[in-house]
Image (cartoon, helix red, strand yellow):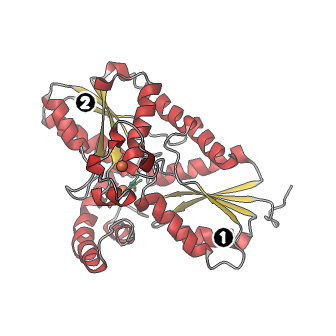
Amino acid sequence: MATRNDNSNRTAVLLVNVGTPDAPTVPAVRKYLFQFLNDRRVIDLPLIPQKILVNLIIVPFRAPKSTELYKILWTEKGSPLMVNAEKNRTKLQEALGDDYEVFTAMRYQNPSLKMVLREVRDKRFGKMIVIPVFPQYASSTTGTIFQFVSQEIARWEVIPEVRMVSQFYDHPQFLEAFADRIRAYNPETWDHLIFSYHGLPNRQVDKVHPEVKSVNCSCETALPPHGKYCYKATCYETTRLLAAALNLKKEDYSVSFQSRLTKNWLKPFTDENLIGMAKAGKKRVLVVAPAFVADCLETTVEIGCEYQELFVEHGGEKVQLVKSLNDHPLWIETLKQLIED
Ligand SMILES: C=CC1=C(C)c2cc3[nH]c(cc4nc(cc5[nH]c(cc1n2)c(C)c5CCC(=O)O)C(CCC(=O)O)=C4C)c(C)c3C=C
Ligand SMILES: [Fe+2]
Ligand SMILES: [Fe+2]
């Protein structure tokens, strides 16, 4: 067995998420948004329009509004994204044992991916496994993490064996973990179940398979050969697999996309989907968000608070958010299997 001073036979495991502000204050949120939205894989516009849009328009206007939402989200222990990341790290460490050291890292803000990579380099691990905790690949999430890691380790004197896990949208344990979360709400007792995924600009989806425009793509009914790294296609595939596991009928569920910045993002939009449901007389709607493995601003506040209000405004009664995986034992088992495979 390797000792703590000799890591040559040990593996560093990095669980990487987007990150969250250090505090629910305007300066901290501004700093977070500045770093996040200046990433050219997130706002993938030509340099000058990108800089003007992000730094003169989006960040100044969004920071105060987002801060109010982060204040609602914040708990005594901090931001749920961070709290859950730490719980995952501890539980996974326990499950893997001493041959591994598990790290939490965030692409934006803290604990910064840069500092964590520095620690891994200095401790001279024999192997490194990087797991961006996004079930479906997107250039703006998993892609930017892989780019950052690749650029950093390119400068190391010794580059150890490295494995990067690009996605796990169809992993049986991951699906069973989400199915278990959904079952806890007795989906058959609700008027409808929405699978709500974080949105993406259509432009970013089209870049993955330039030969097929996303609006003409068959990915809503089956995973096409060009769809393995298409975020839209894998979101629909996760949905089909979960619907099969839960024996859902086609008319009992739908897919839509949330958290858009502009109109030219993946459709249908979850807010419009909910308004349609309310107008169609549906009173109680269950919403699950299988692109997020932990509760965060986009689930707890956007779905749990904002969409709830919107639904009631249009005649509905209850939008119930399905709790995210957080530290579900099958999620820890998913991570363990992704590492040991
Ligand atoms: C689940 C996968 C995610 C994808 C895909 C994604 C793409 C994406 N996001 C933005 C802009 C923002 N995202 C923000 C927060 C945020 N986003 C995700 C996940 C995905 N983003 C998470 C887990 C979080 C963290 C929330 C938290 O609890 O701290 C934010 C900040 C919050 C806000 O102001 O709304 C922004 C902005 C873009 C532009 C994009 C794809 C191009
Ligand atoms: Fe996001
Ligand atoms: Fe597609």
Q: CA distance from mark 1 to mark 2?
A: 47 Å
Nearer the observer, 73 or 325: 325
Residue 201, image x, y percentages? 29, 58
Kindly indicate whether the residue at mark 2 contacts the one at mark 1 (C-beta within 8 angstroms): no
Residue 108, image x, y percentages? 45, 66
Quadrant in the rendering for residue 58? bottom left
Nearer the observer, 13 or 249: 249
Q: How many marks?
A: 2
Nearer the observer, 36 or 28: 36
Nearer the observer, 98 or 72: 98
Mark 2 residue type: Lys
Mark 1 residue type: Glu
Q: Residues within 10 Å of mark 1 (few under 14, many from 20)?
A: some
Residue 107, image x, y percentages? 48, 65
- Residue topped by disc 2: 318
Above or below, 322 against 107 in this view is: above
Above or below, 185 against 29 in this view is: above
Outermost residue toward the top? 189
Residue at image coords 21%, 25%: 283
Residue at image coords 44%, 40%: 324
**1 or 2: tag closer to the N-terminus:** 1
Dividing the image into four quarters, tell me where ligand 2 lies.
bottom left
SS at mark 1 in the image: helix
- Residue topped by disc 1: 119
